[in-house]
Amino acid sequence: MRKVLLLLAGKALRLAALLAALCAFSFWLVSHSPVDPVRAYVGADMLLVGPEQRERIAEYWGLNDPPGERFLRWSEAMLRGDFGTSMIFRRPVAEVIGERFYASLLLMGMAWVLSGVCGFALGVAAGARQGTWIDGIIKWYCLTMASTPVFWLAIVLLMVFAVWLGWAPVGLAVPVGTLAGEVTLADRIRHMVLPAITLSIVGVSSVALFTRQKVVDALASEYVLFARAKGEPETAILWRHVLRNVALPAVTLQFAVFSELFGGSVLAEQVFSYPGLGQAIVQAGLRGDIPLLLAAVMCGAVFVFVGNLLADVIYSIVDPRIRLGKLA
């Protein structure tokens, strides 16, 4: 129990240090960017705003204060649970983050399951047929997808399935002009399928290649050789001895790729105009919305950190040689 508490305490300290560094660096980048927050706030009506109104807007949002003072003021409010108000959406940042993170979580969850299941199946098929044309095709596909940019693949799928074939909507998360109360689960899934497929197609490669190598190693092990000597059929060997040894490591790897999944979702959400957390980060950075940017960066960092923590915990369960005390 003591080792578990020490592990959690060490992870909490690392997370706190990570969040502090990310917030400070993000604030410094936005403060020194050429983006004019007042112009981004007003938008197309900038020509109608006089110097006095510009000064009032800057004073209202505290843009005339020194950057260090603004960062300390935001930090104090954040520690009290107040993330401020978004300059873009004119709403509390906590509400915007809650809505956007929920939408991104649904998208990444669907892509995470699809990439894990398909990657594991392809890896087992390639490992069991090592050296055959099946293995060659799967390895070619995985290596190609591993080097393919997510945004490029998203554009290609958008042109083919949304523009040319018309099978999927062009963008957004719900039908245009539909009230929130009238949006059905089928509508949300239909708008989510193409972005999720984009993320899962790219995310399959790491799981498939890892699983393939584990299957190859398991088939070359002594216990498989002994099972073959006893006359067990190859199907039974693959099911009883190989899959049981490669399933848990593959699941553990799936939790460790949260960072890649989150990074890919940022690009996919931009292409498909999907109103998720990734699109909020991009909009906040381009328009100088510091409260929204810092809160979104913190939320993304916690998401990735939790995924890595789950991967460490699962590793400790799968492999008894790993001690919890060494994970901290």
Image: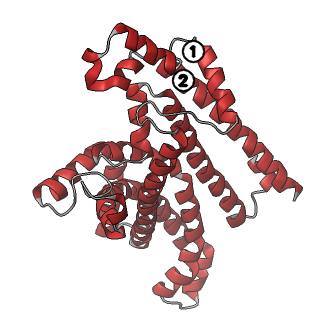
The percent position of residue 318, horizontal first and vertical second, equals: 68, 66
Report if residue 32 is visible in the image: no
Compared with residue 174, is residue 286 higher up or lower down, i.e. above or below? above
The percent position of residue 260, horizontal first and vertical second, equals: 47, 47
Label 2–label 1 contact, CB within 8 A: yes
**Residue in the foreground of this view, choosing between 8 and 57:** 57
The percent position of residue 196, horizontal first and vertical second, equals: 36, 58
Mark 2 is surrounded, within 10 Å at the Cα level, by few (under 14), some (14 to 19) or many (20 or more) other residues, namely: many
> How many badges with numbers are in the image?
2
Q: Which quarter of the rendered picture does the N terminus lie within? A: bottom right
The percent position of residue 250, horizontal first and vertical second, equals: 54, 64
Compared with residue 215, is residue 266 higher up or lower down, i.e. above or below? above
Specify the farthest residue to the top. Answer: 51
Mark 1 is surrounded, within 10 Å at the Cα level, by few (under 14), some (14 to 19) or many (20 or more) other residues, namely: some
In the drawing, what numbered circle is on residue 67? 1
* Disc with the residue nearer the chain's start (2 vs 1): 2
**Residue in the foreground of this view, choosing between 291 and 305:** 291
Camera-side mark, 2 or 1: 1
Q: Residue at x 45, y 65 (%)?
A: 113
Q: Residue at x 77, y 50 (%)?
A: 8
Q: As drawn, is 286 to the left or to the right of 234?
A: left
* Residue indicated by mark 2: 27
Amino acid, disc 1: Pro
Q: Residue at x 81, y 51 (%)?
A: 325
